[in-house]
């Protein structure tokens, strides 16, 4: 249920051809995701319901994990559309045994929306005992504050781009969160895989 409307979650699954053993699950919904473009309309305007889409995505992922009875060690959030998930996991799903040992890692990129979400975005996020205090950082409903919200409820931060807004990275450091800084060299030579694994192990 998003904004008092019950919407179906469609789960699609595919295998990565090169491995066959790795499956990828897709969250789908006709109203939210079957569009010709991802985040902006044909005139370059940020979709009015992008906030609702992010809420639907976060809840859809967590409910799918519960339905499939997975118990993830690491939940790695990538892309701004996943930025509500850490809050939900740490507040609304905190007592669910499926997630009792899960650590949340947030990767930050230069995809943080510059647009402002509708004024009622903050109230739409709240459910399952989430209070206005939990959403205090969203007083101004924009992409920067949404990234800060995600960071606030994450166990570790990976800076995935050298163009992430300093306001967000400074917020993470000031909060005392473990941060893996961006390394262009590690991406180039492939050593970032070891860096990521070590980061996971130390959380």
Image: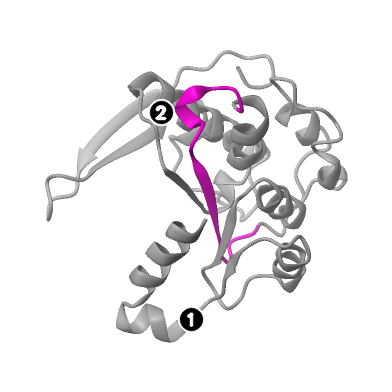
Q: Residues within 10 Å of mark 2 (few under 14, many from 20)?
A: some
Residue that lies at the very extreme toward the front in this rendered image: 202
Left or right relative to 77: residue 21: left
Left or right relative to 133: residue 161: left
Helix, strand or loop at mark 2: helix
In reply to whether residue 108 is colored magenta, the answer given is yes
> Which residue is depicted at the point 19% across and 49% down?
16
- Asked if residue 128 is positioned above or below residue 79 in the image, the reply reads above
Residue 125 disc label: none
- Asked if residue 42 is positioned above or below residue 197 in the image, the reply reads above
Q: Is residue 52 visible?
A: no
Residue 65 disc label: 2
Q: Which residues are magenta?
A: 94-112
Residue 183 disc label: 1
Query: Measured from the top left, where is residue 38 in percent x and y?
Result: 49, 48
Helix, strand or loop at mark 1: loop
Q: Is residue 119 visible?
A: yes
- Disc 2 to disc 1: CB gap under 8 Å: no
Left or right relative to 196: residue 48: right
Find the distance from the CA under tag 2 to the CA under tag 1. 32 Å
């Amino acid at each position: 249920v998003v904004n008092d409307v019950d919407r179906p979650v469609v789960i699609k699954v595919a295998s990565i051809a090169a491995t066959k053993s790795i499956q990828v699950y897709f969250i789908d919904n006709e109203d939210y995701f079957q569009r010709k473009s991802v985040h902006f309309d044909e005139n370059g305007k940020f979709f009015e319901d992008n906030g609702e889409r992010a809420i639907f995505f976060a809840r859809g992922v967590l409910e799918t994990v519960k339905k499939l009875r997975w118990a993830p060690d690491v939940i790695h959030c990538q892309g701004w559309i996943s930025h509500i998930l850490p809050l939900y996991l740490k507040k609304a799903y905190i007592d669910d045994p499926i997630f009792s040992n899960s650590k949340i890692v947030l990767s930050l990129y230069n995809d943080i929306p510059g647009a402002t979400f509708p004024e009622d975005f903050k109230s739409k996020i709240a459910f399952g005992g989430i209070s206005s205090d939990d959403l205090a950082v969203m007083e101004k409903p924009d992409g920067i504050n949404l990234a800060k919200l995600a960071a606030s409820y994450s166990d570790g931060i990976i800076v995935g781009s050298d163009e992430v807004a300093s306001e967000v990275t400074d917020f993470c450091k000031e909060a005392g969160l473990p941060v893996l800084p961006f390394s262009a060299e590690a991406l180039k030579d492939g050593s970032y895989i070891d860096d990521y694994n070590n980061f996971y192990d130390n959380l």
